[in-house]
Amino acid sequence: MLRRPVGILQARAWRDRLPPLGTIGSLVALVAACIFFTARTGRFLTGANLSLVLQQVMVVGVIAIGQTLVILTAGIDLSCGAVMALGGIVMTKLAVQHGLPVPAAVASGIGVAVLFGLVNGLLVSAIRLPPFIVTLGTWNIAFAITQLYSSAQTVTQLPPAMTALGRTFRVGGTSVVYGALVMLLLYAITWFALRETAAGRHVYAIGNNPEATRLAGIDTNRLLVGVYALAGALYGVAALLLVARTGVGDPNAGQTENLDSITAVVLGGTSLFGGRGMVIGSLVGALIVGVFRNGLTLMGVSSVYQILITGVLVILAVAADQLSRRDPSR
Amino acid sequence: MTTAATTATPILQARGLVKRYGHVTALAGTDFDLRPGEILAVIGDNGAGKSSLIRALSGALIPDAGEILLEGRPVHFRTPVDARRAGIETVYQDLAIAPAMSIAENLFLGREPRRGGVAGRLLRMLDRERMLRESAAHLAELRIGIASMSQPVETLSGGQRQAVAVARSAAFARHVVIMDEPTAALGVKESGMVLDLIRRVRDRGLSVVLISHDMPHVFELADRIHIARLGRRVAVVRPGAVSMSDAVAVMTGALHPEALPDGEPR
């Protein structure tokens, strides 16, 4: 008979219900970062500043949802920032220079981002190219198309409807941007779908063991194309949020978003090796990235050092993930 | 071994299966017969075509020629899913499980039940309760002692993981369970548990195809032994009637199958 001492099994069943250690660890890190910056600068813990952090986080936060989905399948998406920039240019240019109604322009921008996701997904699944190389390629392609299509010019004088999500409402003493609600809603929907639906569980399964997932009768190619396309749609939404926040279509946007989103996902406890993690963790991770950037700016640290610190942060997070998953019994 | 099983028509048959890869012949017109309710071991040296045969029977390989019959009717499997739909489940050597996912999720991977009502139809919610309940029932039926179905599979020992893989196949197979080297990665004690488990699967009325390199296990467990050599079936023997060394000698070509006392040479 296959039996283990009953006590151990019960302890495990109880532990199963807690969120994984990585998620708790990232929450602790977020609180620690907030305490640190509050101690170092009086301007950190103010309503106006936290409102600013939220505005900065909403863009990378939405990208991090797409990045989480891709990383859960044991992939990676380096094209996210460039695809977002392209989506932003397409929607602003169509609205301003071609006079398209805002909903149609926004839909077109998101549609272009989905198209890039479809291309990524098809190359990764049907042709089995490594996601790293595929998205490195599409990153550059999207960047070049953005520059060509916009003639490297910023698109300004957007119709007010396009920046509606950048407006704020007041909660207590703090103004909260509407886009942040969009971000939270998207996190809630993704969390639910990943946890409670078969398709969500299959995303985890494919990251755990793609061959087993295929043998279980799941169309893994279709699933991968779906994940990359959905990620593309999310980058399109992030483009809308960025446009709403900045009030312009910027062809040079999205330069730091790929590393920032990967950092957010890994800080949130999702394994780069796929199949483990929670999308809510990526929200915490995005907040950590946002708080760091904001806090360092308040402390007067130049942006070059912020980039340096982000690089160190992502390596530390991946190292922690790697070490914590090393099984001592093996 | 029941007498009924020896006389009944085969549940799964193959006639003249051929598979070539370029100028390499993996299957050179092999036959195969699995009787209802038996454990048939398939043995053969490397390159004898045993894994190609198993892959053809489980739908993972499409043969160039020959036919496969399930309950006497021809079947054409193009994917493992076709074979599963026909009631043939396979336990793969590398286990085909998702380690970070729970036992219940692994058992129901690809056939997750949905909740009833709006939650299931509109929100497409999984029926977790049912997955946990039925997983526990399936494992209990095979007397596998694991308490928590929400436990990730990676927290289990090698033998327990194998037990979960076997239970998944047994739970969904209607006719045949194919097991590829089920004890290869296990210690002595855990191997013994898995062998018991395979017997219980047969005792539930399923027919079992067992691929193994481990001759003592094969001779302990099998009702009949199919010996493959050079892409063909060269003999089918009974463990009681043939010595282990003779079976190995036929497998390697050192002994002609006609020389076996109770061979059914082809």
Image (cartoon, helix red, strand yellow):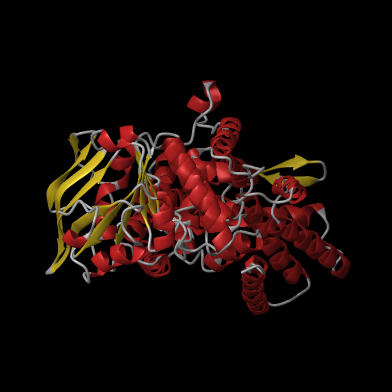
**In the picture provided, is A261 more to the left or to the right than A131?**
right
Percent x, y for residue A74? Answer: 48, 60
Locate residue B194, reporting x and y percent.
Answer: 51, 51
**Which of the 4 image quadrants contains residue B36?**
top left
Compared to residue A330, the image places residue A68 above or below, namely above
Along the line of sight, the residue nearer the viewer: A305 or A187: A187
Residue B152 shown left or right of residue B94 in the figure: right
Q: Which residue corresponds to the image point at 75% horizontal and 41% vertical from the top-left?
A: A170
Q: Nearer the viewer, residue B22 or B24?
A: B24
In this view of the protein, can residue A158 be seen by the observer?
A: no
* Left or right: A239 in relation to B37: right
Q: Quadrant of residue B252?
A: bottom left
Q: Position of residue A243 (x, y in %)?
A: 53, 53
Q: Nearer the viewer, residue B20 or A260?
A: B20
Return the residue found at the far front: B261
Q: Quadrant of the C terminus of chain A?
A: bottom right
Q: Which residue occupies 19% across, 62% down?
A: B259
